[in-house]
């Protein structure tokens, strides 16, 4: 391998740019801290120095004129933000990387506007270096064999009426085996099953292959509002309201599990349900979550068939097809498949995240709908958050 793991500013998830634009317009002075966490029992400390070298190389990334012109074609990005993006540079000094007693430690501190882009780059770097140096079981030959099996499964589904309308997109940049493998996989899917494979969250590859770039908001948007909203109890409503101010009817899929689904639905009133196009699932049982969503829309007098549920939590094709069958003809569904698309190459892939832990000097947290996904450095704050949202 030659050259850096990340060679294009666009080699990231679409929602990093949509969120950064909203930060640029609404919270340019917010200061945050984010922390890396590996959920799998894997010692990544030996990669610390190589990761540091890759992060330093991120300072060389620039938005080219051609890339800017492509971003303009999406109709979502304003001139002032694109001017900022084209002029800005990532500062590696904001990132601290250590081989600590508990393994790999990565902390990012600084202006939210300036450091938000680091997340996906760093996760993709860690994932690729892990596959390159620490896990010899993974191989492209095995990945290609499994991709062939997926194509057979998709063609079989296409021949059955119960799967009419099934489609999915790639959500796998952050945990991919490698950038080269993600490109090869997307090229194959786009050519082989174009009606079922309809887009990618990776901006660079969407541009390269003429695909739809997919993404709206991530947990960090809602987490930060725990410190930015007038009070903790209004944080979710404030996050959703400001998003509407930025994008109106565009990018209208709301992420539901920053606290948990029940707390989200308590805030997701009729006005918000009418303004947003749907919701995204990212933790907990997908069927239970989807049933709650359908019931909530019905209770508000909103026709579920006019709304979309996006499923994106650890999906593989089997799970996606099962969910599609369950909700068929009841509500629109779509699927973002990540790790088990771009890192299904042999051994068990890493489960890694990089999440906000503070904003403007105050703790923030993600509670989630699944055990093991709660992330916060302050146990007292978790208790406060749970109390405010009635989770005690």
Image (tube, rainbow, N blue to C red):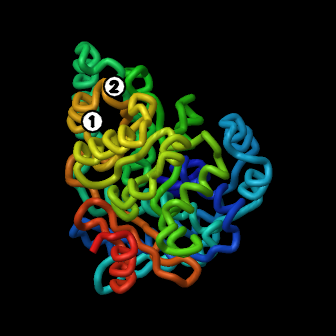
Q: Residues within 10 Å of mark 1 (few under 14, many from 20)?
A: many
Q: Is residue 30 left or right of residue 315?
A: right
- Residue, x 30% and y 65% (percent of image)? 373
Name the secondary structure under disc 2.
loop
x, y (%) of residue 128? 39, 56
Q: Which residue is mark 1?
A: 320
Near mark 2 (Cα within 10 A), the count class, few <14, some 14-19 or many ≥20, is many
Q: Secondary structure at mark 1?
A: helix
Between the C-alphas of marks 1 and 2, the distance is 9 Å
Q: Which mark is residue 166?
A: 2
Q: Nearer the viewer, residue 239 or 210?
A: 239
Picture residue at 30% right of the left edge, 55% below the top: 283
For the point 49% across and 74% down, the residue is: 232
- 194, above or below 65, in the image: above
Residue 180 location in percent, x, y? Answer: 44, 43
The residue positioned 60% from the left and 40% from the top of the image is 250
Q: Earlier in the sequence, mark 1 or mark 2?
A: 2
**Labels 1 & 2 near each other (Cβ < 8 A):** yes
Q: Which mark is residue 15?
A: none
Q: Quadrant of the C terminus?
A: bottom left
In the image, residue 245 sits, relative to residue 191, either above or below, namely below
The mark tally for this picture is 2
Residue 313, image x, y percentages: 31, 49
Residue 134, picture quadrant: bottom left
């Amino acid at each position: 391998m030659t050259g850096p793991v990340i060679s294009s500013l666009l080699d990231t998830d679409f929602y990093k740019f949509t969120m950064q634009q909203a930060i640029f317009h609404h919270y340019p002075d917010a200061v945050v801290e984010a922390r890396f966490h590996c959920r799998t029992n894997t010692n990544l400390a030996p990669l610390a120095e190589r990761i540091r070298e890759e992060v330093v190389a991120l300072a060389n990334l620039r938005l080219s004129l051609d890339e800017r012109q492509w971003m303009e074609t999406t109709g979502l990005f304003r001139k002032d933000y694109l001017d900022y993006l084209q002029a800005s540079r990532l500062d590696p000094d904001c990132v601290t990387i250590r081989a600590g007693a508990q393994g790999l430690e990565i902390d990012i501190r600084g202006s939210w506007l300036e450091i938000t882009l680091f997340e996906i780059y760093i996760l993709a770097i860690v994932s690729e270096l892990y596959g390159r140096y620490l896990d010899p079981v993974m191989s492209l030959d095995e990945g290609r064999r499994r991709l062939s099996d997926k194509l057979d499964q998709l063609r079989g589904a296409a021949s059955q009426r119960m799967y009419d309308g099934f489609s999915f997109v790639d959500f796998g940049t952050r945990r991919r085996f490698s950038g080269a493998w993600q490109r090869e996989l997307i090229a194959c899917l786009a050519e082989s099953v174009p009606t079922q494979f309809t887009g990618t969250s990776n901006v660079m590859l969407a541009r390269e292959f003429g695909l739809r770039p997919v993404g709206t908001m991530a947990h960090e948007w809602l987490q930060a509002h725990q410190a930015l909203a007038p009070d903790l109890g209004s944080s979710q409503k404030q996050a959703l309201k400001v998003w509407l101010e930025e994008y109106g009817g565009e990018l209208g899929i709301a992420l539901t599990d920053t606290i948990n689904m029940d707390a989200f639905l308590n805030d997701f009133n009729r006005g918000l349900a009418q303004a947003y196009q749907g919701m995204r699932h990212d933790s907990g049982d997908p069927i239970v979550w989807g049933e709650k969503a359908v019931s909530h829309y019905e209770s508000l007098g909103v026709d579920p068939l006019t709304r979309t549920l996006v499923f994106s939590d650890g999906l593989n094709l089997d799970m996606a097809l099962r969910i599609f069958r369950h909700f068929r003809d009841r509500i629109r569904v779509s699927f973002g498949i990540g790790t088990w698309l771009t890192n299904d190459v042999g051994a068990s892939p890493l489960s890694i995240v990089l999440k906000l832990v503070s904003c403007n000097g105050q703790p923030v947290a993600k509670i989630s709908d699944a055990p093991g996904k709660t992330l916060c450095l302050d146990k007292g704050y978790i208790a406060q958050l749970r109390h405010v949202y009635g989770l005690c």
